[in-house]
Image (spheres, rainbow, N blue to C red):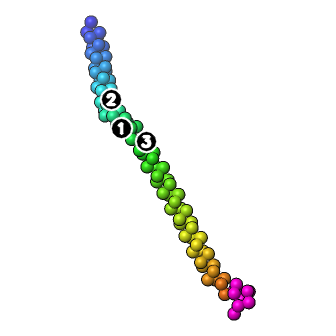
């Protein structure tokens, strides 16, 4: 009989330990669920902000590309200008 009681006490201890561990692991679930719900509700706004930032990056790249091409053309005119004038019969 005493052996059976000892076995039941061990099982009770094991179950108590497992329940405590499970409670600790799942204690933050309501807060996490509310955080996820908040993020999901903000997703359309975040998506529109990302699209806007992508458009701004695209415009910035286009402007930078245009500036570099313009600067390159300006440099080429000054470098090749005298040769072109000589070729056309100028001084």
Nearer-the-camera pick, 43 or 27? 43
- For the residues carrying marks 1 and 2, which lies nearer the camera in this image? 1
Q: Residues within 10 Å of mark 2 (few under 14, many from 20)?
A: few
Residue 32 seen in this snapshot: no
- For the residues carrying marks 3 and 2, which lies nearer the camera in this image? 3
Give x and y (percent) for residue 75.
60, 79
Residue 79: image quadrant is bottom right
Say whether residue 47 is left or right of residue 20: right
Residue at (73, 86) in percent of width and height: 88
- Quadrant containing the N terminus is top left
Give x and y (percent) for residue 58.
53, 57
* Magenta-drawn segment: 83-91
* Residue identified by numbered label 3: 44
Q: Earlier in the sequence, mark 3 or mark 2?
A: 2
Residue at (42, 41) in percent of width and height: 43
Give x and y (percent) for residue 33.
35, 33
Q: Earlier in the sequence, mark 1 or mark 2?
A: 2
Say whether residue 83 is left or right of residue 60: right
Badge number at residue 38: 1
- For the residues carrying marks 3 and 1, which lies nearer the camera in this image? 3
For mark 1, give the secondary structure: helix
Spatial CA span between label 3 and label 2: 29 Å
Residue 26 seen in this snapshot: yes
For mark 3, give the secondary structure: helix
Give x and y (percent) for residue 87.
74, 86
Nearer-the-camera pick, 33 or 25? 33
On whether residue 85 falls in the magenta region, the answer is yes
Say whether residue 65 is left or right of residue 44: right
Nearer-the-camera pick, 28 or 69? 69
* Residue identified by numbered label 2: 26
On whether residue 80 falls in the magenta region, the answer is no
């Amino acid at each position: 009989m005493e052996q059976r009681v000892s076995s039941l006490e061990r099982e009770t201890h094991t179950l108590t330990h497992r329940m405590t561990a499970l409670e600790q692991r799942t204690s933050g679930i309501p807060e996490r669920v509310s955080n996820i719900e908040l993020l999901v509700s903000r997703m359309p706004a975040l998506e529109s902000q990302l699209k806007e930032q992508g458009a701004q990056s695209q415009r910035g790249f286009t402007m930078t590309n245009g500036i570099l091409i313009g600067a390159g053309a300006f440099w080429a005119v000054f470098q090749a200008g005298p040769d072109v004038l000589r070729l056309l019969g100028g001084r």
